[in-house]
Structure formats: C-alpha cells, structure tokens
Image (spheres, grey):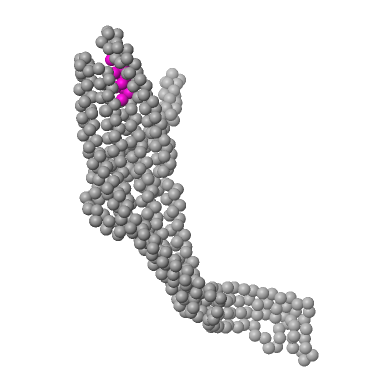
Amino acid sequence: MRRGFLPGFLVLTGVLVFSQFAAPLYAEDYSLQDLYGAALERAERVKFTEEDLAIAKEQKEKARSAIIPDITAYAAYTRYSESKMSAAGPVIQPESSSAYGLRLDQFYSLSGNEFRDIRIADKDIERTSYDISAFKEDYIFSVAGAYYDVLKSSKLVDIARANMERLSRQRDAAEARLKVGEVTKTALLRAEAELSGARSDLVRAENALALSRAVLARVVGIEGDFGLKETDHAEDGITGYTLPSLKEIALSERPELKSLALRREIAGERIRTAHGQYWPFLALEGVYEKRESNPSPFFFNDESISGGVSMNFVVFEGGLRKSQVNEAKSREKQASLLYDDFRREVSVEVENAHLDYLTQKGVFDALKDQLVFARDNFNAVSKQFTFGLADSLDVMDANTLLVTAERQVAEAGYDYHVAILRLRRATGTLLGAVTGAKSTPEENK
C-alpha cells in the first residue's frame, strides 16, 4: 500500500503545483469586437458618463414632484404656569393644550411652468443619452486606435527580428568570405555595424510594444496578460458612399448634433418659463386639525377641517423677471449658434476623414507593390552576393530597402483600417456598426 501510495501522492502534488504556475501561461485572446465590448462594460469613464443619465432621470422626478401636493403632519403641546378662569367661570387660560393635524399645500403657476419643467426634463434625458452615445463612439475609437497600435508595434518587432536574422546571416557570410580572402575586412565591419543597429532597433520596437500593450490594457480595463486576435477586415460599406452622401448621413446620425438640437429646444422652453414668471400664482391649502385643552372651555372647537385658495401676482420685483427673460433669450441664441457652428464643423470633419481614407488606401496599395519589388530585389542581390556578382554594400542597401518597405506597409495597413473607423466616427455610425444598433437614446435607457 505504501509503495503505491507514495508515487501517486507525488504525481498529484506535481500536478497541483504545475497548475498553479501554468495558469498564467494561458492568456485570454481578444478580437477587436471583444475589446469594444469589454471597454463599454468595464471602463470607468464609460460608467462615469452613464451616471449622467441617472442624474437626468432624477431631475425629471424632481420636476414631477412640483405638481404633487405637499402633505405635512404637525403636533404641538403647550404647558402653562397655571390655569386661569374668569369671574363668571369660563376658562381664560388652560393648564395645558395640544394640537395635531395634517396640512396639504400646493403651489401652481397659471402659466403651466411646472408641466413645462417636466417636458424640459424629458428632453434633457434624451439629450444626455445622445451625449453618452457620442462619448461611447469616441471611446471605442480610442480603443481601436490602441488595438492597432499594439498590432503595428508587434509587426514592427517581427520585422526587426527578421532583419536581425538576415543581418546575422550576412555577417556570418562576410566573415567566412573574409577568411578565404574574397572580401576585405571593411565588408565585415559594415555587416557588424548594421547588425548592431538592428539590435538597437529591436530593443526600441520591443519597448514600444510593451508601452502600447499597457495603454490598451488601461483603455479597455484589462488586468493581467492578454493576447490579440487580428480581425479579418473586409471593405466597410461606409466607404462606398460619395462625399455628399456621407455628409448627409453625418448630419442625420451624429449624436452630438442631435444633442445640440435638443439643447436649443430646451433653451426655447426656458424662455417661455421665464415669461411665465409674469403670470399669477395659485396657492391651494387644506388643513385638518385636532385640539385638546385641560380644562376645556365651554365653547371649544376640538376638531376642524378647512380649505383655502389664494392668488398672488408680483407687481414689482426690481427688474428680476426682465433679466431672467433676457438671459434665457441669450442662452437660446448661444445654443443656436453652437448648433450651426457644429454643423459646419461636422461637414469639414467628414470631408477630412474621407480624404484621409482615400489617401491611406492609395498609399497602402502603392506600398504593397513597393514591398513586392523590394523583396524580389533583396532575393536577387543575395543570390548575386553568393556567387560573387555583388558586394556587401549592395546587400546592405537591398536589405535597408526591404526593411523600410516592410515597416511602411505595416504602418500603412493599420493606418488604413483606422481611417475607415475614423470615417465611421465622422458620420456618427461607428457605435451602430459596433453594437449592431443605431446611436439612439433608446439603447441607453
């Protein structure tokens, strides 16, 4: 029994220990869509802005409370130093008295300002929802930028490693040919220098990759190690539209424009609210009261129910209402100017994003051709060097051209994908493309 138990115990212990150390080796892989979902779910900044919607809803509850009467319960007890009676016998001052009851009070403006405030609160909830959608679009665009920065940095690390391997082989070849006297020592020194430069490029590329991964983890809210799955990119449908069509889409879909339009409507409602201060105010009240007295007077009403209506009209208040109206008009004008200005800004932003997309697409296509030529050129020169038809300088120049082309293609390819997302963001359709729904307030409710 002992001989069989001990090996089994050791195997079980080894498995448990290995599992503790092996667990961190399995990092979770994220696609770009996974990062979008994780950022919208985990990021503190997104949660912070979503609280604005909760605040706006509470503002509506506060506005709604203004049309509901206030009910107050009260009670009072009074103790006197002594009881006093008149010569005829009635009580002048009791020994003690108490009263308690309920009071209902309601205050209305005949202009309907209380109901207008509820409408304003509804519009403010909708406006806040559009603001949240705009923030989410900006945030997921920053996530995409950080994602492509990591992929770009990773690609540059691979290019730097491949370059160092090629230069290592070139250095070895130069060293071998130096021994047989086919090249001078200058060729070997040049190869050593190029290899040292490649090592420093690799160190810089690896540090840049580590930094870009840290930035992505911070933006998305990822903890621990992680991997990235490169998304298979297809041509986005938004790129098939003409520039005038893209501008029309942006003017109808940008959540910032919808928010500014609602801000302008709210400012117009506040003008009418300010004018409502010139109207009379109606006050309603109802009281139920129960009284006790010891000793009780002969004519004593111990219970009463009453109601009252009053109307107040402010005749003069030092010009306050006029200033409030003028202020509301100025704010409405500001909102209109801001809306018109942003419409023009959106038009320019769409045009800029469209031109950037066309530029990146053209550059990417041209650099891909350049990379094919540079790779063929390097292979041809390497073979010529092997047979003594080219010197080491020709190989170094061909390698430099190849490395430059590889880096430019890697950067241009990811910049091209970012340009498509920027065009989506400029037209206000990025969030809809990510979540599968339009950027409307309903998705935030």
Q: Position of residue 80 (x, y in %)?
A: 75, 77
Q: Nearer the viewer, residue 151 or 203?
A: 203
Q: Position of residue 37 (x, y in %)?
A: 36, 47
Horizontal arrangement in the rendering, residue 157 relative to residue 282 (left or right): left
Quadrant (top left, top right, bottom left, bottom right) of the C terminus: bottom left
Q: Quadrant of residue 395?
A: top left
Confirm whether residue 147 shows in the render: yes
Residue lying farthest to the bottom in this orientation: 88
Residue at 32% x, 29% y is 158
* Residue 100 drawn above or below residue 184: below
Q: Nearer the viewer, residue 191 or 219?
A: 191
Q: Main secondary structure of the magenta part?
A: helix
* Residue 169 drawn above or below residue 427: above
Q: Position of residue 105 (x, y in %)?
A: 54, 76
Residue lying farthest to the top in this orientation: 180
Horizontal arrangement in the rendering, residue 14 relative to residue 240 (left or right): right
Residue at 37% x, 54% y is 134
Question: Is residue 51 one of those drawn in magenta?
Answer: no
Question: Is residue 172 one of those drawn in magenta?
Answer: yes
What residue range appears in magenta?
163-173
Q: Quadrant of residue 396?
A: top left
Residue at 44% x, 26% y is 13
Confirm whether residue 262 shows in the render: no
Residue at 69% x, 75% y is 77
Q: How many marks?
A: 0
Q: Position of residue 384 (x, y in %)?
A: 20, 18
Quadrant (top left, top right, bottom left, bottom right) of the N terminus: top left
Q: Quadrant of residue 305?
A: bottom right
Q: Nearer the viewer, residue 239 or 353?
A: 353
